[in-house]
Image: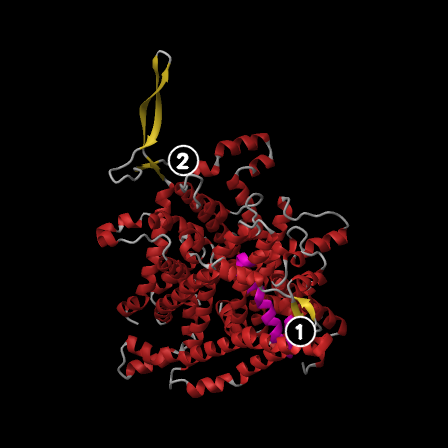
C-alpha cells in the first residue's frame, strides 16, 4: 500500500480485522468444541459452563488428566516434530527416494514419519512423563481432565476400524479410477474444438446438477436383483452388486466424472498446445505425446482434482448408506447409525469421538494441501 | 485432434457416464410409471376346531403371496400410469386443503412441505452465502500479509468437513443444554429447546449451510479481488470516488461474473439439501425433496422399498431443478454466445 490515498482510516481497519477475528472464531468453534467434548466424561462434556467443558474437573477426579508439565512438554514436542516435518523431512525423502519416483518416496517417508510421531505420543511421552510428574510437585499435578475411553470404545469395541478400512478402500478406488478415466477425457476435451466435445461438456454440466438420490433410485432395484439379470452372462458366479464396495466405487466415479473432466480440462488448457504439437512433429502418436510430454507436467492439476475426488468419496452419505450393507459400511453412514441409536450420554460422547476421528484426517488434508484446495476452488470460477 | 483419437481419449469417461448416469435416468423414468409387487392369490382355508358335536369347521378367504418353484415370492410388474405421481403429490388432499384455504393442511402433505422447505432454503441461503463470503474476502484482502495464510486455513475447515459431521457438530452445541443453548438461555433469561419445534431446527439448518458454504464464496471472491485492475481503482480515486463508490462502481462490477458462477453452483448444491436433515435428525419436522426420495428408498417394516414412488419423487425433483436453473443458465448462454467461449 504505497499509495497514500489507499491508506485506510483506523476505524475501518479495526472493524475489518474485528470481523475477521469473529469469522475465524465462528469457523473453528464447532470443530474445536467437539474436539474438547470427545476427551471428557459425559458429565463434563455436556456441562453448561464452558470452562468446565474445557478443563473437565469431573473427568480429572474420576479418570485422570494432564498436568502442567504434560501440556508444556507435549506442545514443545509437537512443535519440534512439525518443524522437522517441514525442514528436515523433504531433504531426507529426496535423498533416499529412487530416482524419478518422488511420490513413492513421499508415501513411504510420510508413513514412517507419521508412525514415529504416533509412537512418540502414545508410548514414549506417557512413559517419560509418568516418571517426571511425581518428582516435580505441583507442576506435575493434573490440571486438565482428559480421557481417551470414548475413542477406545469407538475404535476397539464398536469396530470402527472396519468402517475405517472400508472408507479407505472406497476412497482409494474412487480417486485412482476417477483420475485415470478423467485425465484421459480431460486431455481429449482440452485438445478438441469439435462440436461433440462442446456438447459433451454441456451434458456433463447437466449431469453435475442432478441430485444423487435420483441416480440412486435408478441403481437400487438393479443392484439388489443383479444376481438374476447378470446370470445369463456370468452364470452361477453372477454377483449381487448391492453392498459391494467396488460397485460403489464405480457409482461414485461416474457421479464424480462431470466435475472431474471439467476441472482437469481447465488445467490441461493451461498447458500450451505447442508442447504436445512439438512432440507430435517429432513423431509421437497422440497417446505417446500424452504419455511423454503431458504426464510429467500435469501433476499439480491432477493432485488438486484428486483431492476433490477424495472429498466426494470420503464425505458421501447418501450413496453409501443406501447401497452398502452393514458389513461394508463406510465411516460416515456408520456414525449416523450410531447417534440414531444413542440411548445414554456415554453413547453420545462416543458418537462425538467418532465424529472427531472422521474429521481429523480432513484437518491434516487442509494443513498439507491448502494451496491445492484453493487452486481447485478457483479453477472453475476465475476463468468463467 | 482427429475424431477417432478424441473418442479414444474420452471413451472410458463417456462409457461410465452413460452406464451410471444416463441409463439410470431412463430407468427411473420407466420405474415411475410401473409398480412391481408380489403376486397374491386368494385361497379358501378351512379351519376346524373340535366342538361338542363333532368338529366345527369354518372356511375363510385368505390372501397370500405366490411362491415360485425355488421358494421365492413371485412378483409382477404392471403399468400404472401416473398413479405413483398421484401417490406422491396427493392431489385430492391438496385440493381439499386449498379449498379449506389452510396452509397448515398443505404442509401436512409430505411432498409439498418438502418442496416448500427446499425452495425457501435455496433462495434464502443464496444472498447470505454470497454476502458473508464477500465480506470475509474484503476483510482478508485488507489484513496483514502474514496472517492471511492461517486465516484461509481456518476458513477452509467448515467447507472441507463432512456435511453430516458438520451438521452434527452444530447440533451438539445446541442439543439439550448444549453450550450455545445454555448461553442463549442465560442471555434471554428463558427456557429454550432448540429441537422441539420446526422453525428453530430450520433456523439451525440455514445457519449451518451458511457456515459450511461461505468459505467457498470467500475463496472465489478473494481470488477475484486479486485481479481487480489497480489502474481503474486509482483512476476512480483521482476522480474523487469515495471508498464506498469505488467498491460499488469498480470492484463489484468486476466480480459480477463470479457472482453468477457462485449463484449457479449454489442453486445446484442447495437444491440438493439432504445431509442437514440427517445430521439434525429433522425428518419429523422438516424434510427436503432429496430426503423424500431417500425415505421412499429405505426399507419399510416389511422390508419392501417404494421404488416406484421414489422414482416419481426423483423425476419431480429433477423437473424442479430444471425450472430453477433455467433462467440463470439461459442468461449465461446468451451472454457467452455459442461454442468457443465456453471456458
3D distance between C-alphas at marks 1 and 2: 59 Å
Confirm whether circles 1 and 2 share one chain.
yes
For residue B156, what is the image quadrant? Answer: bottom right
Q: Is residue B157 above or below residue A43?
A: below
For residue A172, what is the image quadrant? Answer: bottom left
Judging depth in this view, the residue of B285 and A282 nearest the camera is B285
CB atoms of marks 1 and 2 within 8 Å: no
Residue at 38 percent across and 80 percent down: it is: A296
Q: Which mark is residue A103?
A: none
> Which color scheme does this rendered protein use?
secondary structure
Judging depth in this view, the residue of B324 and B298 nearest the camera is B298
Image quarter (top left, top right, bottom left or bottom right) of the N terminus of chain A = bottom right
* B34 with respect to A27 (left or right): left
Q: Which mark is residue B83?
A: 2
Q: Is residue B328 magenta?
A: no
Q: Does the rendering let one see residue B145?
A: no
The subunit letter for the residue under badge 2 reads B
Q: Secondary structure at mark 2?
A: helix
Residue at 64 percent across and 76 percent down: it is: B147
Residue at 27 percent across and 47 percent down: it is: A228
User: Residues in magenta?
Assistant: B140-165
Q: Does the rendering let one see residue A380?
A: yes
Q: Residues within 10 Å of mark 1 (few under 14, many from 20)?
A: some
Q: Which mark is residue B142?
A: 1
User: Is the magenta region chiefly helix, strand or loop?
Assistant: helix
Residue A176 coordinates in the image, percent (x, y): 38, 68
Amino acid at each position: 500500500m504505497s499509495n497514500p490515498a489507499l491508506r485506510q482510516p483506523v476505524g475501518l481497519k479495526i472493524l475489518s480485522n474485528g470481523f475477521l477475528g469473529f469469522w475465524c472464531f465462528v469457523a473453528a468453534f464447532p470443530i474445536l468444541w467437539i474436539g474438547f467434548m470427545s476427551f471428557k466424561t459425559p458429565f463434563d462434556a455436556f456441562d453448561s459452563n464452558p470452562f468446565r467443558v474445557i478443563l473437565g474437573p469431573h473427568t480429572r477426579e474420576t479418570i485422570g488428566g494432564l498436568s502442567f508439565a504434560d501440556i508444556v512438554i507435549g506442545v514443545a514436542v509437537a512443535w519440534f516434530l512439525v518443524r522437522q516435518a517441514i525442514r528436515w523431512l523433504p531433504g531426507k525423502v529426496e535423498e533416499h527416494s529412487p530416482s524419478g519416483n518422488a511420490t513413492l518416496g513421499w508415501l513411504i517417508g510420510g508413513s514412517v514419519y507419521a508412525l514415529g510421531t504416533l509412537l512418540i505420543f502414545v508410548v514414549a511421552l506417557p512413559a517419560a512423563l509418568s516418571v517426571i510428574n511425581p518428582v516435580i510437585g505441583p507442576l506435575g499435578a493434573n490440571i486438565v481432565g482428559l480421557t481417551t475411553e470414548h475413542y477406545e470404545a469407538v475404535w476397539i469395541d464398536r469396530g470402527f476400524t472396519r468402517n475405517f478400512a472400508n472408507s479407505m478402500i472406497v476412497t482409494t478406488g474412487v480417486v485412482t479410477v476417477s483420475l485415470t478415466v478423467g485425465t484421459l477425457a480431460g486431455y481429449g476435451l482440452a485438445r478438441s474444438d469439435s462440436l461433440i466435445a462442446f456438447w459433451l461438456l454441456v451434458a456433463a454440466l447437466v449431469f453435475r446438477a442432478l441430485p444423487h438420490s435420483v441416480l440412486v433410485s435408478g441403481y437400487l432395484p438393479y443392484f439388489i436383483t443383479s444376481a438374476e439379470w447378470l446370470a445369463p452372462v456370468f452364470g452361477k458366479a453372477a454377483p449381487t452388486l448391492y453392498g459391494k464396495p467396488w460397485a460403489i466405487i464405480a457409482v461414485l466415479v461416474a457421479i464424480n466424472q462431470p466435475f472431474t473432466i471439467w476441472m482437469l480440462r481447465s488445467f490441461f488448457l493451461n498447458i500450451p498446445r505447442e508442447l504436445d504439437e512439438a512432440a507430435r512433429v517429432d513423431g509421437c502418436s497422440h497417446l505417446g505425446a500424452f504419455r511423454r510430454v503431458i504426464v510429467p507436467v500435469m501433476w499439480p492439476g491432477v493432485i488438486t482434482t484428486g483431492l476433490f475426488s477424495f472429498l466426494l468419496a470420503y464425505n458421501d452419505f447418501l450413496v453409501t448408506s443406501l447401497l452398502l450393507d452393514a458389513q461394508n459400511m463406510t465411516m460416515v453412514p456408520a456414525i449416523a447409525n450410531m447417534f440414531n441409536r444413542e440411548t445414554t450420554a456415554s453413547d453420545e460422547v462416543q458418537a462425538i469421538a467418532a465424529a472427531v476421528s472422521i474429521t481429523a484426517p480432513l484437518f491434516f488434508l487442509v494443513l498439507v494441501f491448502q494451496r491445492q484446495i484453493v487452486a481447485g476452488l478457483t479453477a472453475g470460477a476465475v476463468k468463467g | 485432434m482427429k475424431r477417432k483419437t478424441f473418442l479414444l481419449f474420452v471413451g472410458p469417461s463417456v462409457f461410465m457416464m452413460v452406464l451410471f448416469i444416463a441409463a439410470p435416468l431412463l430407468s427411473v423414468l420407466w420405474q415411475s410409471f410401473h409398480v412391481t409387487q408380489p403376486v397374491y392369490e386368494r385361497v379358501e382355508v378351512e379351519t376346524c376346531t373340535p366342538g361338542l358335536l363333532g368338529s366345527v369347521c369354518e372356511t375363510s378367504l385368505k390372501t397370500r403371496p405366490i411362491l415360485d418353484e425355488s421358494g421365492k415370492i413371485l412378483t409382477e410388474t404392471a403399468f400404472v400410469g401416473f398413479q405413483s405421481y398421484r401417490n406422491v403429490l396427493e392431489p385430492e388432499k391438496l385440493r381439499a386443503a386449498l379449498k379449506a384455504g389452510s396452509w397448515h393442511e398443505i404442509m401436512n402433505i409430505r411432498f409439498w412441505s418438502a418442496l416448500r422447505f427446499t425452495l425457501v432454503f435455496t433462495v434464502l441461503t443464496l444472498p447470505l452465502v454470497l454476502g458473508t463470503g464477500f465480506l470475509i474476502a474484503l476483510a482478508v484482502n485488507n489484513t496483514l500479509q502474514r496472517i492471511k495464510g492461517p486465516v484461509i486455513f481456518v476458513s477452509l475447515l467448515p467447507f472441507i468437513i463432512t456435511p453430516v459431521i458438520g451438521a452434527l457438530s452444530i447440533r451438539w452445541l445446541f442439543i439439550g443444554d448444549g453450550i450455545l443453548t445454555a448461553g442463549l438461555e442465560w442471555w434471554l433469561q428463558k427456557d429454550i429447546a432448540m429441537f422441539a419445534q420446526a422453525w428453530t431446527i430450520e433456523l439451525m439448518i440455514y445457519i449451518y449451510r451458511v457456515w459450511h458454504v461461505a468459505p467457498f464464496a470467500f475463496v472465489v471472491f478473494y481470488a477475484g479481488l486479486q485481479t481487480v485492475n489497480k489502474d481503474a481503482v486509482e483512476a476512480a480515486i483521482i476522480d474523487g470516488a469515495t471508498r464506498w463508490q469505488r467498491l460499488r462502481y469498480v470492484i463489484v462490477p468486476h466480480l459480477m461474473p463470479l457472482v453468477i458462477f457462485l449463484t449457479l453452483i449454489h442453486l445446484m448444491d442447495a437444491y440438493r439439501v439432504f445431509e442437514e436433515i440427517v445430521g439434525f435428525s429433522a425428518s419429523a419436522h422438516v424434510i427436503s425433496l432429496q430426503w423424500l426420495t431417500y425415505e421412499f428408498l429405505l426399507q419399510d417394516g416389511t422390508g419392501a422399498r417404494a421404488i416406484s414412488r421414489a422414482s416419481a419423487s426423483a423425476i419431480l425433483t429433477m423437473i424442479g431443478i430444471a425450472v430453477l436453473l433455467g433462467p440463470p443458465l439461459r442468461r449465461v448462454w446468451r451472454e457467452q454466445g455459442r461454442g468457443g467461449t465456453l471456458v
